[in-house]
Image (tube, grey):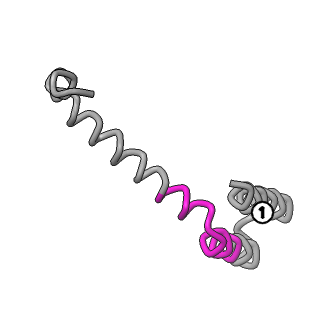
Amino acid sequence: MGIFGKVLLAPFAPVAGVVWLAERLEEQAAAIYYSPETVRAELDDVHAAHARGEITDEARDAMEESLLARLLEGRDG
C-alpha cells in the first residue's frame, strides 16, 4: 500500500485500534473463563453451597456438569 492508500485509510486508524483492543480483551477473558483454576474455584463454590444446603443434589450435579464441559471446551480450544 502506497502513501495514497495510507492517507485514505488514516481516518479509520482509531477504529482499528479499538478493534485490536477488543480482541485482546476477549482473549484475556476467555483465558480466565476457561482456566482450570477458575473452574476449580467455581466447583469448590458449588460444593460449599451444596454442603450448606443452599442448592439441591440435582442443581449441584447440573452445575458440575456445566463446569466440567467448560473445562473440556477450554482444552479443545
Location of residue 77 with respect to 7 vertically, above or below: below
| Image position, residue 52 (x, y; %) | 71, 77
Q: Main secondary structure of the magenta part?
A: helix
Q: Is residue 32 left or right of residue 13?
A: right
Location of residue 54 with respect to 11 vertically, above or below: below
Q: Is residue 4 left or right of residue 23?
A: left
Location of residue 3 with respect to 32 vertically, above or below: above
Q: Which residue is mark 1?
A: 68
Q: Is residue 25 left or right of residue 58?
A: left
Closest to the observer, 65 or 29 = 29
Q: Is residue 54 magenta?
A: no
| Image position, residue 46 (x, y; %) | 70, 70
| Image position, residue 57 (x, y; %) | 85, 65
Location of residue 64 with respect to 4 vertically, above or below: below
Query: Within 10 Å of the Cα at label 1, are there few (<14), some (14-19), or many (20+) other Cα atoms?
Result: some
| Image position, residue 31 (x, y; %) | 55, 62
* Position of the C terminus by quadrant: bottom right
The range drawn in magenta is 28-45
Q: Secondary structure at mark 1?
A: helix
Q: Residue at left 74%, top 56%?
A: 76
Question: What amino acid does circle 1 point to?
Answer: Leu
Q: How many marks overall?
A: 1
Q: Is residue 56 left or right of residue 15?
A: right
Q: Residue at left 41%, top 53%?
A: 25
Q: Residue at left 47%, top 59%?
A: 28
The image quarter containing residue 51 is bottom right
Q: Is residue 32 magenta?
A: yes
The image quarter containing residue 75 is bottom right
Q: Residue at left 35%, top 39%?
A: 19
* Position of the N terminus by quadrant: top left
Closest to the observer, 17 or 56 = 17
